[in-house]
Image (cartoon, rainbow, N blue to C red):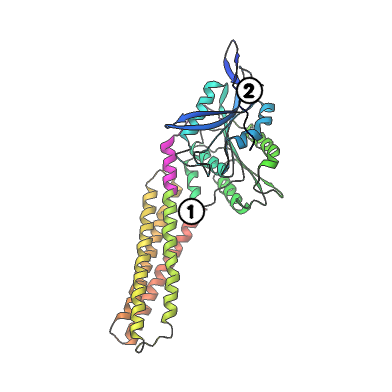
Amino acid sequence: MRPLALSLFILLLLPSAAFAVSEKIEKQTLISQGKKRTYYLFAPSTIKAAASVPLIVMLHGSGRNGLSLVEKWKDLATKEGIIIVGPDAQNASGWRIPEDGPDFLRELVEMCKAKYPINPRRVYLFGHSAGAVFALNLAMIESEYFAATSIHAGSWRAEADFAVIDYAKRKMPLAIFVGDNDNFFPLTSVKRTNDVLKERGFPIELTVMKGHTHWYYDLAPKINKDAWDFLKRHELTEDPRYAGLAHAEEVGEVNKILEEINGLRNKASGLTDQLNTKEQELKNKDFIRDRDTINRIAREEMTIFEESAKLFRAAADKADQAGKLKVGDKYKQYLSIIAQHDRKSAEVMDVLREQAGALLGNESFEVINAKRNEARQRADKLQREADKLAQKAEQIKS
């Protein structure tokens, strides 16, 4: 990588104001939450003191830094009279709450406002890849602080990610640009994000670029121009309002709990494979001759069913916990149904454990078989009830 040429700001002393402009990208630092944070800023010399200038905060992709986007926007910023600032994520691998925002980004924006004639109602977000995902999250968390958001090659992918939508107090305008050959954010994922946001009332525009991959940098001039054409149409109708870190941390907490729920469910589902293996072992076993083997398998099945029931109940408890946080009514209802579903699934496991335990009895084969069939019928009934709850949850989610 060639060395970055640094230059001092030229101070323009004007009767009404003084602010720094430069033809070069400036690498600067800011102390935020006790840590030195690096950012790259470009304020074109075309800016006038009496102007009302837009600001774009740029969020880079994984393994990159703020310069990677700012240098690609520099020419357009000069032509259009835009101030652009690209902070570095604390960890180059990706953006995180609360380490990277929203507090840090707010401090950065407010510092820029203090130095330059920025229109507070025209502060925008642009993100690429990991930065695009973070921009989407910030667009929901700080929907009344930023005017609009445009992203390239990004979307929400996990179902838990969509919970952040409930935190948006304003339907922020959004634009997504993506290639139809993007292997990191495939069209199905991007279109799902677009469709859900549109269903929730957000003014969103999706542009699919034919033959384009995840690589932003070769087509940056076109992507940037189209992104700016979208952003510049939008402005806050009143002065910005900042929600703050506590708001963002709660979003992160909800997503964390939903991930834990999915993890517990996946573990419970994984145990099913073990049970299938045990059932195969039971086949063709003679009730009298293979009694010891049958008893061993029955005890192993009972242990697996017991563990699976515990996992489902733990997932239900997590869903109840998430439902007590500040989420929208839709997600409260969704989480309530999820909790009911997982407890019903735990009941299924309890009855199946009872079915396996019947094999340990001293009764005749006919009596034991009758008990197992009766337990199986109860388990099937409970499973149908669980399936209905799952369908109800899906309807709420969609």
Kindly indicate the quadrant of the structure image that contains residue 67. Answer: top right
Q: Is residue 145 visible?
A: no
Toward the bottom, the furthest residue is 289
Residue 22, numbered label: 2
Q: Earlier in the sequence, mark 1 or mark 2?
A: 2
Disc 1 is placed on an element classified as helix
Residue at x 46% of width, y 56% of height: 393
Residue with the mark numbered 1: 396
Count of labels in the image: 2
For the residues labelled 1 and 2, say whether their Cβ atoms are less than 8 Å apart.
no
Measuring from the top left, give residue 198's x and y in whole percent. Answer: 58, 45
Q: Which residues are magenta?
A: 236-255
- Quadrant in the picture for the N terminus: top right
- Residue type, numbered disc 1: Ile
Nearer-the-camera pick, 289 or 383 = 289
Q: Is residue 81 visible?
A: yes
Please say whether residue 84 is one of the residues in the magenta stretch.
no
Q: Is residue 11 above or below residue 199?
A: above
Comparing labels 1 and 2, the label whose residue is closer to the camera: 2
Measuring from the top left, give residue 171's x and y in whole percent. Answer: 54, 38
Relative to 216, is 337 on the left or the right? Answer: left
Between the residue at mark 1 and the residue at mark 2, the CA separation in whole angstroms equals 52 Å
Residue at x 71% of width, y 50% of height: 211
**Badge 2: few (under 14), some or many (20 or more) residues near its Cα, within 10 Å?**
some
Toward the top, the furthest residue is 15
